[in-house]
Amino acid sequence: MARMNMIQALNSAMDLMLGRDPDVVIIGEDVGYFGGVFRCTEGLQRKYGEHRVIDAPIAEGGIIASTIGMGVHGLRPVAEIQFADYIYPGIDQIISELARLRYRTAGDFFAPVTIRAPCGGGIRGGQTHSQSPEGIFSHVCGLKVVMPSTPYDAKGLLISAIEDDDPVVFFEPKRIYNGPFDGDPDKPATAWSSHPKGEVPDGYYSVPIGRAEVVREGEDVTILCYGTMVHVAEATAARSEVDAEIIDVRSMVPLDVGTLTKSVEKTGRCVIIHEATRFSGFGAELAATVQEECFYYLEAPITRVCGWDTPYPHAFEWEYFPGQKRLAAALDQVMSA
Amino acid sequence: MARKSRLHIPHPPARPGDRPDFGYVEISEAGEVDRPEVNSRVKHMESLAHDMVRVLDDQHAALGPWNPHLDTHELQIALRYLVLSRVFDERMLRMQRQGNISFYMQSTGEEAVSIGAAMALQPSDMLFPSYRNSGLHFARGRNPVDLMCQCLSNSKDMCKGRQMPIMYHWARGKIFSISGNLGTQFPQAVGWAMASAIKGEDAIAAAWLGEGSTAEADFHHALTFAAVYQAPVILNIVNNQWAISTFQGFAGGERRSFAARGPGYGIASIRLDGNDLLAVHAVTRWAAERARTGNGPTLIEHVTYRAAAHSTSDDPSRYRPKDEWRSWPLGDPIERLKRHMIVQGDWTEARHDKLVADVRELVDESWKEALTHGSMTEGPFLDKYELFEDVFKDIPTHLISQREQMLGFEED
């Protein structure tokens, strides 16, 4: 066991998989010699060589496409997209090619590609370095989509993603790379070292894709969240008189419907929070699923707390960010219904 | 006040009712273009991107340094595949017109591009075709029945009914799946070639796309990655002059050859007569050797003509002269190879007639056999519940539940 932040945990996962499987390769902008702009691949090229940890041209479409070809030829590539906001030049290769290759060839060809992409705001990144596009990818059949909220899950889920024979889009909430940010920008930053899930095994383990986790048990209301919002929810619940049960969804696809519905059946109330914009966001899928599965248990309308339906504004980041105040108001609202 | 636009809009030399005019196609004499060593530096061979490698001359002799000197047996095999490709297309077009298949795309007039290349590559080389490369399958020995079953979406369809007709693949034959999104296979082929190099293997990749698709970002991604990593890959542009209704000028071909894009990326680039099977074979073999010996990628422009409609949903008489193909200065690839073999004394009209008759019989028999595996109206059919499979390796619970829903409707 070691204390790791999320960057170190992700690095450890890739280090381990590069060591275990000669077919694992990493490719992305600045990932090689430099070790990545967020340092996630630091030291890996030195250790495994420049033929396994490969610096790429600035062409996300080319990065994704080349990993598809590599995957078809038996490699197990991990592509880093420097910011999730930069993934769009590669989106045709992801949606039309990577996601559907197995289907269109009836299983004869597939590409076990993992796409890592730092997402989310709260870092003064403006509208091109802050997006959370998980809902775009969860809408595509054939992709698995995950977002960890802790170093422990980040390492375990990334190992699962790399080992998975299906393509996985792996979103990394960059605001919590270095510590469990609870949504209050005025508070001094906390480090992962004091968080129980900042304790990460040095060796191999995995966290299965497709399982949500109950991170706080409660009786009054279920909060469905993932990524940075898990920590916002925990901080909000800690201060609230409402006894909230918090579920870290972790995996958008496949979705662990059982864990979600079991909780809502118990609490009878549900608040969904995500940083992405609200309209047609992943929260809509969660709300629809809860409504379909738990309608007769519901005592209040399901409520969503999301990023506003605007681009992520640079100067008004904290007005945009769905923080504790907005979540607390939503909890009060569903409790008073 | 009316605006007066100064924008340049490319125009093809001839529209319906006009006399065909291929004066814009720059053609070198057969045998005239030099053949550099396979390890030549790109900057020393840039003229190859503008000239046109041709082996067969107008008298059907094979000339010059690019003559691949195929023996009689190889020539006969090539001719048989060319004829098979054309006869297969004719048959399947008829079947589409009669309503037996939903859609079809012919390779007519550009068969040599696929057959010549496939014969110059090794069986371990991976091919990433576009949709007018069915000849790659024939040249790798694929049973025509398999392709017909795909077009029929019947119980033996290798795609299990998930793709439109002609979007074949063949894992064992190392031929990749065809996508309806154009050009996507180009950078994928580069990735495959990069993996081959990473693994230290000898196998190379080859990919094809139309000149129209060179406008897609994927084309440029492929060239960038191929150049940066010196990937062992052959990137083929099939310039058949037409992308549905837009002539090659709309992809940027008005002032410069498509092959000329390669040297800008630092890639060896060769323009050739795509209706000359010997030129296609020779240049592909050169490019394969260049790739296999670690000298990097090659971009090849095959100058040819799309003699048929874009697809069965297209009517080219609406946008180009009806008989344009007859004026195509590079002729018909089958006729040219046949004449060459006759001139060499290896072939006769009578033997050719026999070949065509044999191939027709094979295609007829294949069609009959394909139908035994089902048609669009008669079984055996594919299992429709398999439509939920292969989205993921293992079928997830939400798809199991949707399959049950569909099953419920069937039972009503």
Image (tube, coloured by chain):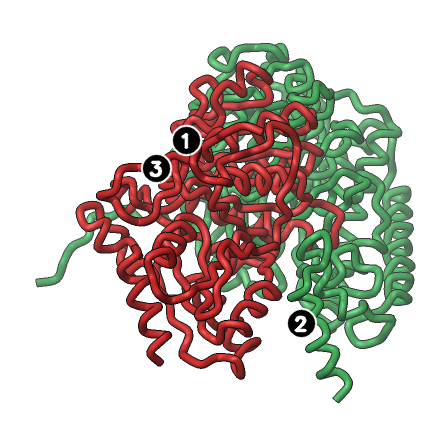
Chain colours: A red, B green
Circle 1 sits on which residue? Answer: A58
Q: Position of residue A128 (x, y in %)?
A: 30, 44
Number of residues whose C-alpha sits closer than 10 Å to that of mark 2, classed few (under 14), some (14–19) or many (20 or more): few
Q: Real-space Cα distance between discs 3 and 1?
A: 34 Å
Q: Chain of mark 2?
A: B
Q: Earlier in the sequence, mark 3 or mark 1?
A: 1
Q: Quadrant of the N terminus of chain B?
A: bottom left
Quarter containing the C terminus of chain B:
bottom right
- Residue B261 in view: no
Residue B355: where, in percent of width, then height? 88, 46
Q: Nearer the viewer, residue A48 or B190?
A: A48
Secondary structure of the residue carrying tag 1 is loop
Q: Which residue is mark 3?
A: A190
Give the residue type at disc 3.
Answer: Thr
Relative to B119, is B56 on the left or the right? Answer: left
Spatial CA span between label 2 and label 3: 44 Å
Nearer the observer: mark 2 or 3; the answer is 3
Q: In this rendered view, identify the residue nearer to me: A26 or B126.
A: A26
Secondary structure of residue under mark 2: helix
Asked whether disc 3 touches disc 1, contact meaning CB atoms under 8 Å apart, the reply is no
What's the residue at 63%, 63% (across, down)? B312
The crowding category of the residue bearing disc 1, from other C-alpha atoms within 10 Å (few below 14, some 14 to 19, many at least 20), is: some
Tag 3 and tag 1 share a subunit: yes
User: In which quadrant of the rendered view does residue B71 lie?
Assistant: top right
In the image, residue A108 sits, relative to residue B208, either above or below, namely below
> Which chain letter matches label 1?
A
Q: Is residue B96 above or below residue B182?
A: below
* Residue type marked 2: Gln
Is A133 above or below relative to A156? Answer: below
Q: Which mark is residue B402?
A: 2
Which amino acid type corresponds to the residue marked 1 in the rendered image? Ile
Q: Nearer the viewer, residue B339 or B164?
A: B164
